[in-house]
Image (spheres, grey):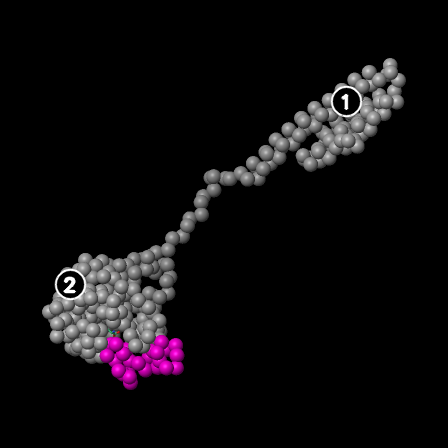
């Protein structure tokens, strides 16, 4: 039995020494010290010993057990330290590696221009309105005095959703005039920017989706002079003092009289160049005095109130403001382009 105990001790200690991890060590603990373990098996034979042999053997057995337990504890500590060390190594951060730069986008020049325009109008007491891009032809045409058969209602110009031409992508921001009159009471001063849609082919000056800014004032005693004065003030604030504008007569179903406003070409200063197609002028908006029929349909008495409205092409305003020659650059969203503003 003495030899048995000695051999268990040597074997066990060597095995503990060789254990690679906590699980292996625990398996060894069970193998030697468990209920069915090797040392336990030897101890169970104690009963067979004579009374003289027993105390010495008992003491030896206890020593072996203490030695094994001590070895297990020591090895277990070492293994835990080793595991921690390995984990720290694996999770180590090299703080000297250069960081990954986060690529930031850039504010779009058209929205820079829009924010400037909004600021100017808000400063004049206008309220900014937002409205639907999917619109009823009732608001886009009927209420704007464009009767059935009016050329602007044609299928070749307008994106309709249904056979009956009742639901459409708005072709102008002018329905916002109606939404304003339906929800507000005069005096009304609104500015309504947003997307509009027309069946146009893409080229340097056209896109099937573009942006307009609708503006409208309804009050007592409002005249065409207020319209011109307001627009000239806005243009000078945007493009600088002395910017030259001109108003040409035009026709819109919902304004009477109607006009278009041009700005002298920013590229050539009026001499004529490719940007202004040789004209020397760039058309930026349509405008006029709100038609009495439109006021009446909106429950506003044209004998008491008058008003003006305009619809500005936002892309064109931005192109003039930042001297951009091709409309397509506005929609491509190439950061190398956007970052220049
Ligand atoms: N809605 C017109 C257009 O798209 C512009 C406009 C707006 C004209 C308001 C007069 C008054 O061309």
* x and y, in percent, of residue 47 in the image: 86, 22
Q: Residue at x 20, y 62 (%)?
A: 126
Q: Residue furthest bottom?
A: 149
Residues rendered magenta in the picture: 141-167
In which quarter of the view is residue 122 placed? bottom left
Tag of residue 64? 1
* x and y, in percent, of residue 69 in the image: 71, 25
Q: Residue at x 27, y 72 (%)?
A: 175
Tag of residue 155? none
Dot 1 lies on which element? helix
| Quarter the N terminus occupies | top right
Residue 149 drawn in magenta = yes
**Callout 1: CB less than 8 Å from ligand 1:** no
Asked if residue 249 is positioned above or below residue 51 in the image, the reply reads below
Q: Residue furthest top?
A: 52
Residue 199 drawn in magenta = no
Q: Are marks 1 and 2 in contact (CB under 8 Å)?
A: no
* x and y, in percent, of residue 277 in the image: 25, 74
Q: Is the stretch drawn in magenta largely helix, strand or loop? A: loop
In which quarter of the view is residue 333 placed? bottom left
The reply, left or right, for residue 302 in relation to residue 138 is left
Residue 331 appears in view: yes
Residue designated by label 2: 233
Mark 1 and mark 2: Cα distance apart in space: 102 Å
Looking at the image, is mark 1 or mark 2 earlier in the sequence? Answer: 1
């Amino acid at each position: 039995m003495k030899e048995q105990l000695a051999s268990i001790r040597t074997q066990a200690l060597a095995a503990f020494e060789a254990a690679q991890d906590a699980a292996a060590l625990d398996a060894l603990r069970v193998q030697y010290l468990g209920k069915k373990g090797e040392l336990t098996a030897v101890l169970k034979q104690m009963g067979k010993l004579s009374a003289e042999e027993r105390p010495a053997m008992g003491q030896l057995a206890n020593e072996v057990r203490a030695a094994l337990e001590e070895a297990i504890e020591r090895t277990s500590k070492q293994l835990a330290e080793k595991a921690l060390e390995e984990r720290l190594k694996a999770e180590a951060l090299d703080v000297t590696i250069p960081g990954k730069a986060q690529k930031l986008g850039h504010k779009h020049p058209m929205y820079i221009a829009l924010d400037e325009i909004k600021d100017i109008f808000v400063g004049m007491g206008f309220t900014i309105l937002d409205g639907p891009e999917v619109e009823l032809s009732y608001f886009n045409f009927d209420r704007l005095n464009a009767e059935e058969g009016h050329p602007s209602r044609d299928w070749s110009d307008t994106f309709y959703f249904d056979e009956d031409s009742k639901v459409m992508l708005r072709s102008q921001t002018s329905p916002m005039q109606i939404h304003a009159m339906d929800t507000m009471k005069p005096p009304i001063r609104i500015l309504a920017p947003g997307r509009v849609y027309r069946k146009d082919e893409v080229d340097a000056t056209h896109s099937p989706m573009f942006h307009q800014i609708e503006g409208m004032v309804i009050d007592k005693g409002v005249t065409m002079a207020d319209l011109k004065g307001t627009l000239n003030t806005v243009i000078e604030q945007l493009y600088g003092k002395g910017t030259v504008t001109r108003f040409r007569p035009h026709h819109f179903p919902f304004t009477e009289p109607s006009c278009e406003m041009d700005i002298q070409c920013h590229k050539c200063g009026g001499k004529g160049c490719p940007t202004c197609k040789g004209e020397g002028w760039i058309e930026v908006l349509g405008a006029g005095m709100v038609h009495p029929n439109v006021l009446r349909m909106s429950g506003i008495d044209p004998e008491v109130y008058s008003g003006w409205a305009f619809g500005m092409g936002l892309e064109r305003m931005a192109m003039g403001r930042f001297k951009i020659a091709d409309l397509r650059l506005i929609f491509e969203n190439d950061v190398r382009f956007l970052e220049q503003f």
